[in-house]
Amino acid sequence: MWLAMAMMVSTRLWLGGAISPHRDKGLIQALADQIQAIALCRPLLAVDGLPSYVKAFQRAFRSKVPRLGQPHRCQLWSWSEVAIVQVVKERTVGQLIIQRRIVQGSQHLVQQLIQASQGQGGINTAFIERLNATFRQCLSPGPAHSCPGPTTGNLAGRRHVVGCFYNFCTYHDSLRVPFYLAKGSRRWLRRTPAIAANLTDHCWTVAELFDFRVPPSPWIPPKKRGRRSKHTQALVQQWC
């Protein structure tokens, strides 16, 4: 089973992922569509050497622009605020060659986004590789008598449990900030990825995580031709 995931570097927040028995375009495109739905207007996307990543993110981060005065189909324009960088690793005899490429965006824009996300450093995928190792260790199948084999269904559920526990219940050492007290003393304020992303104000317990009820999606009235009935209008005023 292949697991494609994404994270927000500045807060170490796990954003989501996709699961598939094959590492194909469908897996990568499903991940790219998830990131496009929640990303800010100026993200920096860092991917590895798989060519499907670049094509999938370029396909996801673009908009339809109508052709003025022309009856043809809309043009697809890529988001100019999005920068895509790629890290290509080639292993030869006795050495590892790493190439860092800017696929989309300028050098100045990439440096600004790197400074805003991780503070210093260059183009790399070290943060997501560490997160992949964490998930791989937590999702590894146990003995046959105690853990079922990996399937798309149970692996997706276990992935969400591990991801939510990582975001809300686990302190991250790289996210701690200094807290200065009187007489020059200093203490460290520990934070979870969810705290750093302003999603919560405290570290959750496991019981609090599993007892949390996710609110349902907002109700969208069905699209019908003509005027809405009084019953439908009352539901719209109540739930929308």
Image (tube, rainbow, N blue to C red):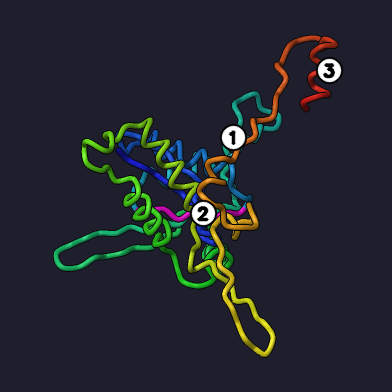
**Residue marked by disc 3:** 234
Secondary structure under the numbered disc 3 in the rendered image: helix
At 40% from the left and 55% from the top, the residue drawn is: 131
Secondary structure under the numbered disc 1 in the rendered image: strand
Pick whichever, 17 or 194, lies toward us: 194
- Residue type at tag 1: Gln
- Tell me which corner region of the image, top left, top right, bottom left or bottom right, holds residue 194: bottom right
Distance of label 2 from label 3 (alpha carbons): 41 Å
Q: Nearer the viewer, mark 2 or mark 1?
A: 2
Distance of label 2 from label 1 (alpha carbons): 45 Å
Q: The N terminus is located in which quarter?
A: top left
139 relative to 83 in the view: left or right: left
Q: Residues within 10 Å of mark 2 (few under 14, many from 20)?
A: many
N-terminal-most mark, 1 or 3? 1
Pick whichever, 96 or 149, lies toward us: 149
Q: Where does the image place residue 63, in percent across and percent down from the top left?
A: 60, 38
- Residue type at tag 2: Cys
- Residue type at tag 3: Ala
The answer to whether mark 2 and mark 1 are in CB contact below 8 A is no
Say the numbered circle drawn on residue 184.
none
- Tell me which corner region of the image, top left, top right, bottom left or bottom right, holds residue 2: top left
Residue 43 shown in magenta: yes
Q: Nearer the viewer, mark 2 or mark 3?
A: 2
**Residue marked by disc 2:** 169
At 37% from the left and 54% from the top, the residue drawn is: 134
> Which residues make up the magenta segment?
42-48
- Tell me which corner region of the image, top left, top right, bottom left or bottom right, holds residue 216: top right
